Amino acid sequence: MITGTHSGVGKTTVMLALLEALTRRGMRVQAFKVGPDYLDPTFHRVVTGRPSRNLDGWMMRCSEVLKSFARASDDAELSIIEGVMGLFDGLRGRSEEGSSAQIAKWLSMPVILVIDAGGLARTAAALVRGCQALDPELKISGVIFNRIGSKNHLDILREAVESACAVPVLGGFPKEEGIALPERHLGLVRAAESLTPSIRGRLAEMAETFLNLDELVKMGDSMAEIPLLPSIPQEKKPVRCRIGVALDAAFHFYYQDNLDLLQGAGAELVFFSPLNETEIPVDLDGLYFGGGYPEVYAEGLSKNQPMIGSIRKFAAGGGPIYAECGGLMYLANRIETVEEVSFPMVGLLPGRIRMGKKLKALGYREVEAQEDCLLLQKGEKARGHEFHYSEWMDDSLRESFNGLRKPYHLFRGGERSGWREEGFSHDHLLASYVHLHFASNPNIPVRWISLCEAFRRRIDRSEGTR
């Protein structure tokens, strides 16, 4: 696991450099990300050519984390996990829940600590010793420094840490602004936009030049078998339905496990682009609109009226549709950008979405269904994450708009008070700002697949056959 003392120390830079260098050596490397972040896994995938998965101790039970890790790592030569925030940072200050430390312990994983070397010398040893002392069960197996000033600076840091902590220093990256990844309001921009060939080449070169890659690989080779790791059968289940998944520059925030669980429950996933294609794929039994940047591509989405028409037709026929965050925005009447330009959207939901310059919501969320809906039955709970700069306007329209209701009581992570209503629902549509992790409730993929299969059978009966 690649983790750090705090956010901003350079974990992602180190992670991408390792993945790039080891992949170029011909290794099959599997990447993971601790926490709910949707973006870093897309960077991992560009480099390794393999889907990266989120491992989250709050949204997922320990058993689900182990299953996800086992499935994805089965054919890999080395697995590397990128941590979240600082090593011990999670849901609260008094527990490890939701932290990198929690996942590292569940998986008995060697921890590589990334430390920002700017203005730091012998005190680096105190940081490492403090992490060792706070939780002796963790295996802090190495240190990588970022933004070192010179070779002499790294020598001082190495001497301090290795003499006081008995932990090897695996190297250090110099200050280099050329590999900084550009940012957008929700964090990093899309991997395809920012991980240029020149940046990827430089990341690989830095890892080979400044890090002891051979020692790092040996750590993975010397790991003992994880006692609790389950055996995952690779049986292929028959296809019960076809679900169209929106995937393009405007929609690309998905938890890979959500897609895996849908496939495992019998869904054939068909990817399509609301931005670039003129209609949804044929013979679909459900639609899934994930998060992303629909406000950035609002003009193009709005102009694609043939696609909007095909979505409306699917909805009018009773086709099951699930949308979250960016998907909710797309299904609304219109999106108003930060520049106060308004673009009409699909119009399955009332009101308008107004973009803001300040963050409107951030953090773990638990939802409890107040009625049966597309993913949950009344009283069932699920966990996820909320992160957006937009807000939904015109609540007065809700009750009279196509029979839509608010399906969720929404709770902040770990709290059971101060709930609020959230989302939109009717018998075959569910839209919410919350990115749910389906592993938090195993009934979600089963229920959705069943509803899509029922729609498929109804259409087949009415049309004779497909």
Image: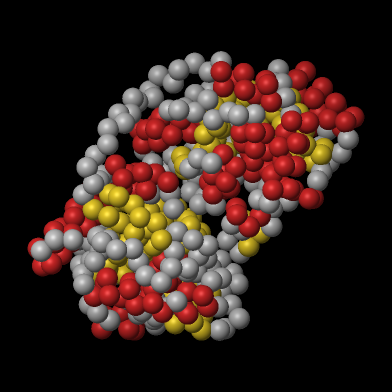
Vertical side of 146 occupied by 185: above or below: below
Q: Position of residue 276 (x, y in %)?
A: 48, 68
| Foreground residue among 360 and 34 | 34
Res 78 quadrant in image: top right
Where residue 226 appears, x then y in whole percent? 44, 21
Q: Is residue 344 above or below residue 231?
A: below
- Residue found 53% across the figure and 25% down from its top: 77
Q: Is residue 43 left or right of residue 209?
A: left
In the image, residue 345 above or below residue 289 = below
User: Which quadrant, please, contains the C terminus?
Assistant: bottom left
Residue occupying image coordinates x 44% and y 82%: 344
Q: Residue at x 44, y 53 (%)?
A: 254
Report the side of 102 relative to 384 (left or right): right
Q: Is residue 314 visible?
A: yes
Image coords of residue 201 (percent x, y): 72, 42
Query: How many tags in the picture?
Result: 0
Q: Is residue 203 above or below residue 219?
A: below
Judged left or right of residue 341, residue 344 is left
Nearest the eye: 290 or 352:
290
Q: Is residue 188 left or right of residue 253?
A: right
Q: Is residue 92 visible?
A: no
Quarter of the view holding residue 285: bottom left
Instruction: Please state the horizontal and vertical placement of residue 216, each as a whole percent of the image.
Output: 65, 24
